[in-house]
Amino acid sequence: MNPPKITLPRGNVLLVGAGALPVALLPGWVLYLRQLYGWQVRVCLTRSATGLVASDALAAISGRPVLGPEWRPAGGTVEHREAAEWADLVVVIPATGAFIAKCAAGITDSLALATVGFTGAPVFIVPSLGGPRLRSKAVRRNLAALEEDGYHVLPTETGTSAHTGADDLGAMPSIFTVLRTIADSGAVGAGGTEAGGADAESAEPGPAGRVAEGTA
């Protein structure tokens, strides 16, 4: 499967990872996006995400320090403003129920939430929710509110539950689904079917995100 062509003004992509199990797949995503598109990729993590994926690994693979979970004012910048203005594209992946709820309410009490709240770049929300959470009226209201506010919310897929080992709703979509949705959205420059930098099939990191669990 060839990846879609996506053109960004400066080639700057910010991945925001919240504390659901698929955040452990982010190193593969970063490597894939850098190889395939030649993008500059930065990562911002919530506090709960740092317990599921190593910041050192993400920094090594992206070639840039990881943002979060706390602000570091000693660095001499207002980090959420700098990151928000740097990004041509923001992808919240995975987005947990807690992150979705706070974002829908306009709460910016973490570096990750503040960056998403301040950016003028297109923001794509990629949920990772267990089946019961996906069926929650509160979660559905929050997802609808995000769409009304102009965020691009991707539908979840069926995946393997880490809790039961059985198929369940609420899994994070695959990387190709996410990229195709971005390309088809009209929110960024797109067109064609190919991206340079790597062979699509050999670079594909597998069924990334097909884990139907979200935590915080």
Image (cartoon, grey):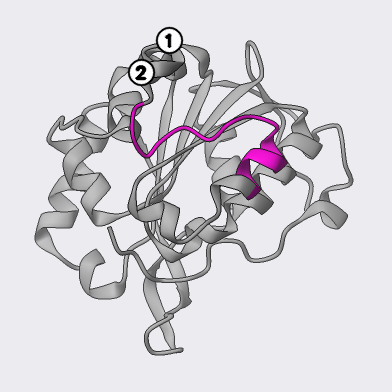
- Label 2 neighbourhood size at 10 Å, few (<14), some (14-19), many (20+)? few
Disc 2 to disc 1, how far (Cα)? 6 Å
The one of 29 and 204 positioned closer to us in this rendering: 29
Q: Which residues are magenta?
A: 57-71
**In terms of image quadrants, where is residue 145?**
top left
Residue under circle 2? 73
Q: Position of 179 compared to 125: left or right? A: right
Circles 2 and 1, Cβ within 8 Å, touching? The answer is yes
What residue sits 58% from the left and 58% below the top? 25
In the picture, the quarter occupied by the C terminus is bottom left
Above or below 161: residue 87: above
What residue sits 79% from the left and 46% below the top? 2
Task: Look at the numbered disc 2 and give the secondary structure of its residue.
Answer: helix
Q: Position of residue 143 (x, y in %)?
A: 23, 46
The answer to whether any part of residue 100 appears in the image is yes
Residue 76 - label: 1
Does 65 appear in magenta? yes
Q: Position of residue 85 (x, y in %)?
A: 45, 11
Above or below 187: residue 70: below
Q: Position of 191 compared to 128: left or right? A: right
Residue 214 - label: none
**In terms of image quadrants, where is residue 168?**
bottom left
Residue type at mark 2? Pro
What residue sits 63% from the left and 11% below the top? 9
What residue sits 35% from the left and 34% below the top? 112
